[in-house]
Image (spheres, rainbow, N blue to C red):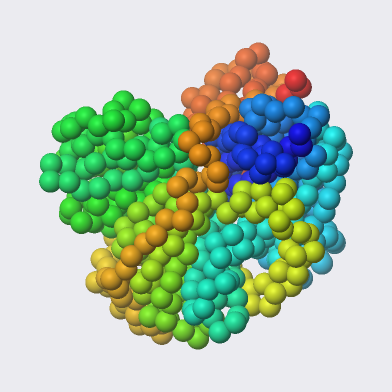
Amino acid sequence: MRYGRALDIGTSGLRGQAIDLDTKETISTAMTSRHPVPGMNVIDHVNFAMDSGQEVATGLLIRAINNLFKLLNIDLSKVTLIAVCGNPFQLSIFQGIEIRDLAYAGKSMIEKLGIKPPDRNGAIVKASDMGIKGINANVMIPPAVTHEIGADAMAMLTETGVLEREGTKIVVDYGTNAEMALIHEGNIYTGSAAAGPALEGQQIRDGMLAAPGAISNIEIKENGWLCYVLDDALLPQEGDVIDPNTGTVVVKGKMHGKAIGVTGTGVVAAIACGFDSGVVSGSKVNTPDGILHMQDGISIDSKDIDEAGKAIGAIRAGYLTLMIEAGIWVEDVDVAYMSGASGLYVDAKKAQKIGMVSPGAKEMIQYGNTSIMLARRMVMGERTMDELREMTKRLKAKHCMFASSGEFKDIYSVEISLWSYGMPWSAYNDMMDVYGLKHVPGDPVASHSVRRSATDLPELRGKPVAILRNAGVELIGKIEGCISCGKCEKECPESAITVKDAFVTINSERCMGTACKRCEMDCPKKVLQIKKLQIKAM
């Protein structure tokens, strides 16, 4: 018997599967609840690696992978190949290669700093050389297209089948970095919008990744809002009917008492239902307590809607910018492909209503985690390194850097006005006029959606998913001058830090990294520096 392991290194967490290479059967599946490197997005992860040392960031990631692989529960001596997929940031940290070139836009700055970008054209390395324990096998790392478009974008294109379909269409991988591609007249226009983690359920008060116990969808019923909760096989099941104004349970459902948080798709559904019900306007929640209630005490507020709105705005600005690049507009794109956990579990029509999907798309096709799908096919020999390298050449031709795009910046400023500054939708196209941009329809065309995957992870077939809720990664160190006052503990929004006798311990997967650093800022003696901490020895 021979086993392969497929691994998706996402910005919000890790997902792995063990596969019997003789029968192609999925033996087991496991995922982390968070990413082991401090931070909420790739920029945070890269900044941490640059600040604390890449060996620290890589060490945290490898240790989490080792702990995740234990949950797959197979004979390690029979693993013959590991295939990994992810964006260039994550794969570079994983591989332990230069990352500073990813942190800077523009060749001039990279040259000024004397940074030599590494070869990201794919690699095959020994698992033992990377610190992956107990496995005498090769690790297959696919190539990247550009510094921001990588194997996850290729996965989005190859595994959805979008390239085989005629006509003009768009595909988006809905995640912290929303990779997207517009296919028009034989050209592929690619881009990556820094949407942030809200659509994956993070930076949301009661948010979580798509995992058992997550509220993933909401429907309006006559007597309240029906919540859908993911079960142990990541399938949405009916939960309670709730009064969104008060949280009162109107009807108990099959998943009563089993919701532990809300994923990004649940937030999207709540916003869309809030718009329809009149209890949400912009980011304002018009309930008696200013909170939108779901089952089991889970709720969202205006701050959560603002976070989700920024992500939705970045995505809409992204796909509109690609359309401008191609010389077309929303009415020219009939088909939208949606991938990733958020792309699969979200109610497609609700997503289209609030701007996540182009309003001109008449058909929406939903897929799950295409990154792990590609990793699986690499493990099984169905995607070769040469084939992937050829695709990268094709994708480089029409890549759009949103960070330097004037159109993207203009559209995103309109989105921020809509989601964060209280501008009504009626003024949206007035602002588009100011920038000389075409109007965006307020109501989408009549559309239908098709789900091509039952769950975010492929080939589960009803088997439960093992969740690694604590990746076992900690940073520790004795801080000279620390008086052990405990203020850093009190100020940490994620309860990630503890201090005793001047020894500081940080649970790295809970730490928000450079996006926060309240512990450092609020240290009365100004002696705490996360970059001085090291990985706790096992």
Who is closer to the viewer here, 350 or 196?
Answer: 350
- Quadrant position of the C terminus in the picture: top right
User: Residue 261 appears in which quarter of the rendering?
Assistant: top left
Q: Residue at x 85, y 35 (%)?
A: 136
Who is closer to the viewer here, 168 or 422?
Answer: 168
Picture coordinates of residue 291, whole percent (x, y): 25, 40
User: Residue 421 appears in which quarter of the rendering?
Assistant: bottom left
Left or right: 273 with respect to 87?
Answer: left
Picture coordinates of residue 115, whole percent (x, y): 83, 60
Q: Residue at x 51, y 39 (%)?
A: 461
In this picture, is 274 found above or below 56? below
Picture coordinates of residue 246, whole percent (x, y): 18, 35
- Say whether residue 215 is visible: no
Q: Residue at x 34, y 38 (%)?
A: 237
- Say whether residue 339 is visible: yes
Most distant residue in the front direction: 23
Q: Residue at x 47, y 45 (%)?
A: 455
- Quadrant position of the N terminus in the picture: top right
Picture coordinates of residue 410, whole percent (x, y): 46, 74
Who is closer to the viewer here, 473 or 426?
Answer: 473
Who is closer to the viewer here, 414 or 271?
Answer: 271
Most distant residue in the left direction: 222
Exactly how many numbered labels are in the figure? 0
In this picture, is 189 found above or below 88? below
Most distant residue in the top direction: 501
In this picture, is 414 found above or below 501? below
Left or right: 115 with respect to 221?
Answer: right
Left or right: 111 with respect to 219?
Answer: right
